[in-house]
Amino acid sequence: PCLERVIAAGIDVRSLRVSPEVAVHQAIRQCRQGLLRRHMQCFFRSFRTESNATQTLLHMAIRCGQLDVTRFLTHAHCEATSLTADDLIGPMYLGESIDMRQVHNNMDSHWTTCQVTINRNANGAEAARLAYHLSRNRYQVPIVQMAGWWSRHESTARGIVVNFANVVNHIAAFALAVPPLPEILQLPP
């Protein structure tokens, strides 16, 4: 519903970009429970993405494995052309932090670390596959119509025959919302 409101307000969601680092730190600042906020601040104090680059909303939805948001953004013609195979493997953030439970209980004689992750269980490859398949056939019909590479045959059962189908698919691949990564192409449809 939030993204629908943004579109209804006239904002082009294709142009919106997100910084994962800023988003995490903003979420921590907005946390209302003091103890939980301190735990999160300690865990994510060292949170840095591999680059400070911002990402499109579709890119973030794919990395977080959010299928419903991926579907919505793909239908809104958003893109994630900078998506790489590394984005689909493993969590967005994996690090270690001091276990704050010991700090809170004043057990500072022996420190232990705990693993901290973001989107560890997310299925980014599945979300990327969904975006790929939703956008894959978006431009074939307009290309065929503009090029005039079709004909109507009443005698055939299909009715319409497309000429140069491989060329049409190749041209349409340049407009994909998600790059055709091997990790996506090997998944079942």
Image: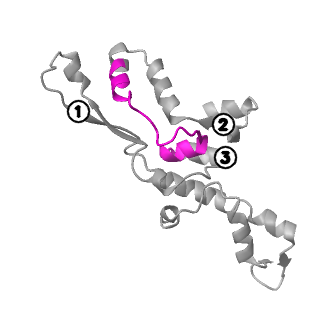
Residue located farthest toward the front when viewing the structure as drawn: 51
Which residue is labeled 1 in the image? 113
Mark 1 or 2: in front is: 1
Rendered location of residue 142, percent (x, y): 80, 63
Asked if the residue under mark 3 is in contact with the one under mark 2, i.e. CB atoms within 8 Å, the reply is no
Q: Which residues are magenta?
A: 38-66
Which residue is labeled 3 in the image? 78
Kindly identify the amino acid type of the residue bearing the numbered disc 1.
Thr
Circle 2 residues within 10 Å: few <14, some 14–19, many ≥20: few
Residue at figure coordinates x 18%, y 16% from the top left? 105
Rendered location of residue 67, percent (x, y): 52, 47
96 sits left or right of 165 in the view: left
Asked if the residue under mark 1 is in contact with the one under mark 3, i.e. CB atoms within 8 Å, the reply is no
The answer to if 62 sits in the magenta stretch is yes
**Rounded to the nearest whole Å, what is the CA distance between mark 1 and mark 2?**
36 Å
Q: Is residue 168 visible?
A: yes
Whichever of labels 2 and 3 marks the residue nearer the N terminus, that label is 2
Rendered location of residue 177, percent (x, y): 64, 54
The answer to if 50 sits in the magenta stretch is yes
**Rounded to the nearest whole Å, what is the CA distance between mark 2 and mark 3?**
9 Å
140 sits left or right of 48 in the view: right
Asked which quadrant contains residue 137, the reply is: bottom right
Whichever of labels 3 and 1 marks the residue nearer the N terminus, that label is 3
Q: Is residue 1 visible?
A: no
